[in-house]
Amino acid sequence: MPKNLQIGSRIFEYPAQGDKAGWGEEATEWASAVTDALTTVQGPNDILTTSATLINNQTTPANIPGLNFDVSEVQAIDIKYLVIRTFDSGASVITEAGRVLGSFNGTEFTISVETDGNDTGFDISVLNSGQFQYTTSDLTNHVSSTIRFEAKTIDLP
Protein backbone atom coordinates (compact mmCIF):
# COMPACT_ATOMS: atom_id res chain seq x y z
CA MET A 1 0.00 0.00 0.00
CA PRO A 2 1.50 3.39 -0.98
CA LYS A 3 2.45 5.98 1.60
CA ASN A 4 1.31 9.60 1.19
CA LEU A 5 4.24 12.02 1.43
CA GLN A 6 3.68 15.77 1.45
CA ILE A 7 6.15 18.36 0.12
CA GLY A 8 4.74 21.87 0.54
CA SER A 9 1.10 21.62 -0.44
CA ARG A 10 1.58 18.70 -2.83
CA ILE A 11 0.94 15.07 -1.80
CA PHE A 12 2.72 12.18 -3.51
CA GLU A 13 1.75 8.54 -3.35
CA TYR A 14 5.11 6.88 -2.74
CA PRO A 15 5.44 3.11 -3.15
CA ALA A 16 5.96 0.85 -0.15
CA GLN A 17 8.07 -2.30 -0.19
CA GLY A 18 6.28 -5.03 -2.09
CA ASP A 19 4.13 -2.70 -4.22
CA LYS A 20 3.90 -3.69 -7.87
CA ALA A 21 5.97 -1.90 -10.51
CA GLY A 22 4.76 1.25 -12.24
CA TRP A 23 5.68 3.84 -9.63
CA GLY A 24 8.68 5.34 -11.43
CA GLU A 25 7.01 8.56 -12.52
CA GLU A 26 5.48 9.35 -9.10
CA ALA A 27 8.74 8.46 -7.29
CA THR A 28 10.73 10.69 -9.66
CA GLU A 29 8.31 13.60 -9.15
CA TRP A 30 8.60 13.18 -5.36
CA ALA A 31 12.43 13.13 -5.55
CA SER A 32 12.38 16.27 -7.72
CA ALA A 33 10.09 18.07 -5.26
CA VAL A 34 12.33 17.09 -2.32
CA THR A 35 15.41 18.31 -4.20
CA ASP A 36 13.71 21.65 -4.94
CA ALA A 37 12.64 22.01 -1.30
CA LEU A 38 16.14 21.27 -0.02
CA THR A 39 17.60 24.16 -1.99
CA THR A 40 15.84 26.45 0.49
CA VAL A 41 17.63 24.66 3.34
CA GLN A 42 21.16 24.69 1.91
CA GLY A 43 22.24 26.31 -1.31
CA PRO A 44 25.37 25.33 -3.24
CA ASN A 45 27.43 28.25 -1.87
CA ASP A 46 26.09 28.30 1.69
CA ILE A 47 28.57 27.62 4.50
CA LEU A 48 27.56 25.28 7.32
CA THR A 49 28.77 26.13 10.84
CA THR A 50 32.57 26.31 10.69
CA SER A 51 35.29 27.28 13.19
CA ALA A 52 38.59 29.05 12.61
CA THR A 53 41.38 30.16 14.90
CA LEU A 54 42.14 33.87 15.08
CA ILE A 55 45.50 35.37 16.01
CA ASN A 56 45.86 37.84 18.87
CA ASN A 57 47.06 41.35 17.93
CA GLN A 58 46.48 40.80 14.20
CA THR A 59 47.05 44.40 13.09
CA THR A 60 47.03 43.85 9.32
CA PRO A 61 44.00 42.16 7.72
CA ALA A 62 44.38 38.36 7.56
CA ASN A 63 42.15 35.82 5.79
CA ILE A 64 39.49 34.01 7.81
CA PRO A 65 39.95 30.39 6.71
CA GLY A 66 36.82 28.99 5.07
CA LEU A 67 34.98 32.32 4.92
CA ASN A 68 35.11 33.16 1.24
CA PHE A 69 32.61 33.20 -1.60
CA ASP A 70 32.82 32.58 -5.34
CA VAL A 71 31.89 36.01 -6.71
CA SER A 72 31.17 34.50 -10.13
CA GLU A 73 28.16 32.78 -8.51
CA VAL A 74 27.25 34.66 -5.31
CA GLN A 75 25.33 37.94 -5.36
CA ALA A 76 24.36 38.35 -1.70
CA ILE A 77 25.47 36.92 1.65
CA ASP A 78 24.12 36.69 5.19
CA ILE A 79 26.75 35.58 7.73
CA LYS A 80 26.13 34.89 11.40
CA TYR A 81 29.24 34.70 13.59
CA LEU A 82 30.44 34.29 17.16
CA VAL A 83 33.91 35.37 18.31
CA ILE A 84 35.25 33.90 21.56
CA ARG A 85 38.47 35.36 23.01
CA THR A 86 40.13 33.98 26.15
CA PHE A 87 42.84 36.00 27.90
CA ASP A 88 44.29 36.90 31.34
CA SER A 89 45.85 33.42 31.31
CA GLY A 90 42.36 31.92 30.98
CA ALA A 91 40.66 33.96 33.70
CA SER A 92 38.71 36.18 31.27
CA VAL A 93 36.50 35.34 28.28
CA ILE A 94 34.76 37.83 26.02
CA THR A 95 32.30 36.99 23.27
CA GLU A 96 30.77 38.88 20.38
CA ALA A 97 27.90 37.71 18.20
CA GLY A 98 27.36 39.43 14.91
CA ARG A 99 25.79 39.41 11.51
CA VAL A 100 27.25 40.51 8.20
CA LEU A 101 25.02 41.36 5.25
CA GLY A 102 26.65 41.91 1.91
CA SER A 103 26.27 42.03 -1.83
CA PHE A 104 28.49 41.77 -4.88
CA ASN A 105 27.57 43.98 -7.84
CA GLY A 106 29.95 42.36 -10.31
CA THR A 107 32.87 44.58 -9.31
CA GLU A 108 32.63 45.52 -5.65
CA PHE A 109 31.73 43.52 -2.54
CA THR A 110 30.03 45.73 0.06
CA ILE A 111 29.06 44.72 3.60
CA SER A 112 27.35 46.03 6.71
CA VAL A 113 28.12 44.59 10.15
CA GLU A 114 25.77 44.38 13.13
CA THR A 115 27.00 43.15 16.53
CA ASP A 116 25.44 42.42 19.89
CA GLY A 117 27.33 45.37 21.37
CA ASN A 118 30.13 43.41 22.99
CA ASP A 119 33.56 44.61 21.88
CA THR A 120 36.05 41.78 21.58
CA GLY A 121 38.58 43.81 19.58
CA PHE A 122 37.63 41.87 16.43
CA ASP A 123 36.92 43.64 13.13
CA ILE A 124 35.79 41.99 9.89
CA SER A 125 36.19 43.15 6.28
CA VAL A 126 35.92 41.68 2.78
CA LEU A 127 37.99 41.81 -0.39
CA ASN A 128 36.30 42.21 -3.77
CA SER A 129 37.42 38.62 -4.46
CA GLY A 130 34.92 37.41 -1.81
CA GLN A 131 37.57 36.56 0.82
CA PHE A 132 36.72 37.77 4.34
CA GLN A 133 39.48 39.09 6.57
CA TYR A 134 39.89 40.19 10.17
CA THR A 135 42.01 42.19 12.57
CA THR A 136 42.18 41.78 16.36
CA SER A 137 43.37 43.83 19.31
CA ASP A 138 46.12 42.76 21.69
CA LEU A 139 44.68 41.07 24.76
CA THR A 140 46.93 40.67 27.82
CA ASN A 141 48.08 37.09 28.44
CA HIS A 142 46.05 35.89 25.45
CA VAL A 143 45.12 32.19 25.46
CA SER A 144 42.91 31.73 22.37
CA SER A 145 40.62 33.44 19.89
CA THR A 146 38.10 31.57 17.77
CA ILE A 147 35.40 32.50 15.30
CA ARG A 148 32.43 30.27 14.52
CA PHE A 149 30.36 31.23 11.49
CA GLU A 150 27.70 30.11 9.05
CA ALA A 151 26.43 31.76 5.91
CA LYS A 152 23.50 31.76 3.51
CA THR A 153 23.88 33.06 -0.03
CA ILE A 154 21.70 34.26 -2.85
CA ASP A 155 23.29 33.06 -6.05
CA LEU A 156 23.00 33.98 -9.71
CA PRO A 157 20.03 32.23 -11.30
Image (spheres, grey):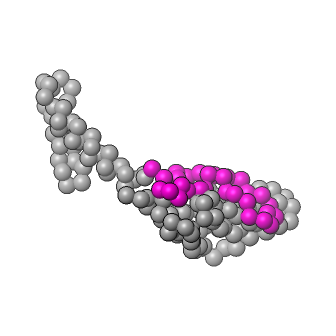
Please report the residue visible at 62 percent of the width from the left and 51 percent of the height from the top.
Answer: 66
Q: Where does the N terminus fall, quadrant-wise? A: top left
The residues colored magenta run: 44-73
Residue 115 position (above or below residue 74): below
Q: How many marks?
A: 0
Looking at the image, the residue that sits furthest to the bottom is: 117
User: Is residue 68 something one can see in this rendering?
Assistant: yes
Q: How far from the left and from the top, in percent, is residue 14?
A: 19, 36
Please report the residue visible at 31 percent of the width from the left and 49 percent of the height from the top.
Answer: 36
User: Is residue 92 something one can see in this rendering?
Assistant: no
Residue 142 position (above or below residue 101): above
Q: Tell me if 86 is positioned left or right of 151 in this view.
A: right
Please report the residue visible at 21 percent of the width from the left and 36 percent of the height from the top.
Answer: 27
Residue 4 position (above or below residue 57): above
Residue 113 position (above or below residue 152): below
Looking at the image, the residue that sits furthest to the front is: 107
Q: How far from the left and from the top, in percent, is residue 75?
A: 47, 63
